[in-house]
Amino acid sequence: MSRATASEAPGSAARVVECYGRRVIVETTAGERHAAVLFGKRLQVVCGDRVQVRREAGSDEWQVTVVEPRTTVIARTDNRGRTEPLAANVTLVAIMLAPEPEPDLYMIDRYLAGAEYAGVKGAVLINKADIKGATNLSAAIADEYRRAGYPVVWLSALGGDGLDELRALLRDEVTLLVGQSGVGKSTLCNALVPASIRPTRALSASTGEGTHTTVAATLLPLPGGGELVDSPGVRDFAPAPVSEAMVQTGWPEIRAAAIGCRFNNCLHLREPGCAVQAAVEVGAISARRFEGYRRLVNLLRQLQPSHERPR
Ligand SMILES: Nc1nc2c(ncn2[C@@H]2O[C@H](COP(=O)(O)OP(=O)(O)OP(=O)(O)O)[C@@H](O)[C@H]2O)c(=O)[nH]1
Ligand SMILES: [Mg+2]
Ligand SMILES: [Zn+2]
């Protein structure tokens, strides 16, 4: 029997806390942080992954050798239908929006749906509550998502409003914080984690949009309990594809009303006896949210390879 060399020795358990493609920062169970590289071309890791690491004998370099099975994975799909994981083992996706930059509510719907498909809870954070004149818009948005069944927290990462309510929401969760560039995700991380000095930057004066300041997902422990993953702002988001019948599960209010549809395979598009369409007509379900559902059905049809598309 040959003796194991140092480089074959079993690894020690660690967590990926920052991810830059094939280079990562891991934190070991003992609380030590190391820069590490992925060992072997087939390994793919994201922030939140549980891994095993080892150090080559006589080398300073740490290697990630094993990725443990994920309990959850949040992934996005690009416009060519390629799916890319964003974070692993999270229990909550918190979608942040703000009066500026101008919110894309359909993208927020798709994030919430993507969380549902991944078996992860969703919440909506409305930041920059201190900005004057934005109250009416924010109240309407908050109302729409509360009626759909999501927790909504109205806060000011800079002014401090709503932070206690938010701490209570995040206490027992591993939360992925997402949203358009410039909504204030990193500013919130700095407010909740005193040791955090994440770079933040003002919106562009010419476009009114964020400037994509954060470049890599980073996991931060929250002092009061829970963990928060800051992530780079995105222009668009589509979830990993699901079957057509599954799409509606990303809209809790549609799923609930669908119990009353005449056909149990109703997609609520133009079927007779549809309780969802009836609820939209009387305003019990937001027409804008319903439109978000229809758009995702169409988008997923487009992303499907043409030979698999329903005729
Ligand atoms: N008025 C106001 N401005 C805020 C608040 N939170 C953040 N900002 C400002 O919004 C701008 C963008 O904040 P960031 O924290 O960099 O935004 P981000 O979401 O991390 O952006 P990316 O990293 O590019 O995705 C900065 O100028 C912040 O000071 C807030 O509560 N109120
Ligand atoms: Mg940021
Ligand atoms: Zn229906």
Image (spheres, rainbow, N blue to C red):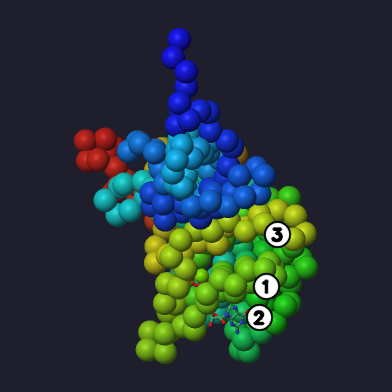
Which percent across, then down, holds residue 175?
62, 54
Find numbered disc 2 in the image and state the secondary structure of the residue it sits on: loop
Of the two numbered discs 2 and 1 on the same chain, state the one appearing first in sequence.
2
Residue at 53% over, 51% down? 34
Q: Which residue is nearer to you in this view: 285 or 128?
A: 128
Residue to which mark 2 is pinned: 158
Give the Cα separation between the discs numbered 3 and 1: 10 Å
Is the CB–ligand 1 distance for label 2 below 8 Å? yes
Which percent across, then down, holds residue 32?
62, 50
* Outermost residue toward the top in this view: 1
Residue at 65% over, 80% down? 158
Residue to which mark 3 is pinned: 222
Find numbered disc 1 in the image and state the secondary structure of the residue it sits on: helix
Residue at 50% over, 28% down? 9
Judge whether residue 100 can be spotted in this image. Answer: yes
Q: Is residue 109 above or below residue 307?
A: below
Q: Dot 3: within a 10 Å radius of its alpha carbon, few (fewer than 14), some, or many (20 or more) residues? A: many
In the rendered structure, are the residues bearing label 2 and label 1 in contact, judged by CB atoms less than 8 Å apart?
yes
Is the CB–ligand 1 distance for label 1 below 8 Å? no
Judge whether residue 70 can be spotted in this image. Answer: no
Give the Cα separation between the discs numbered 2 and 3: 17 Å
Residue to which mark 1 is pinned: 191
Q: Dot 1: within a 10 Å radius of its alpha carbon, few (fewer than 14), some, or many (20 or more) residues? A: some
Q: Quadrant of residue 238?
A: bottom left
In the rendered structure, are the residues bearing label 2 and label 3 in contact, judged by CB atoms less than 8 Å apart?
no
**Image quadrant where one finds the N terminus:** top left
> What amino acid is at disc 2?
Leu
Which percent across, then down, holds residue 237?
41, 58
> What amino acid is at disc 1?
Ala
Comparing labels 2 and 3, the label whose residue is closer to the camera: 3
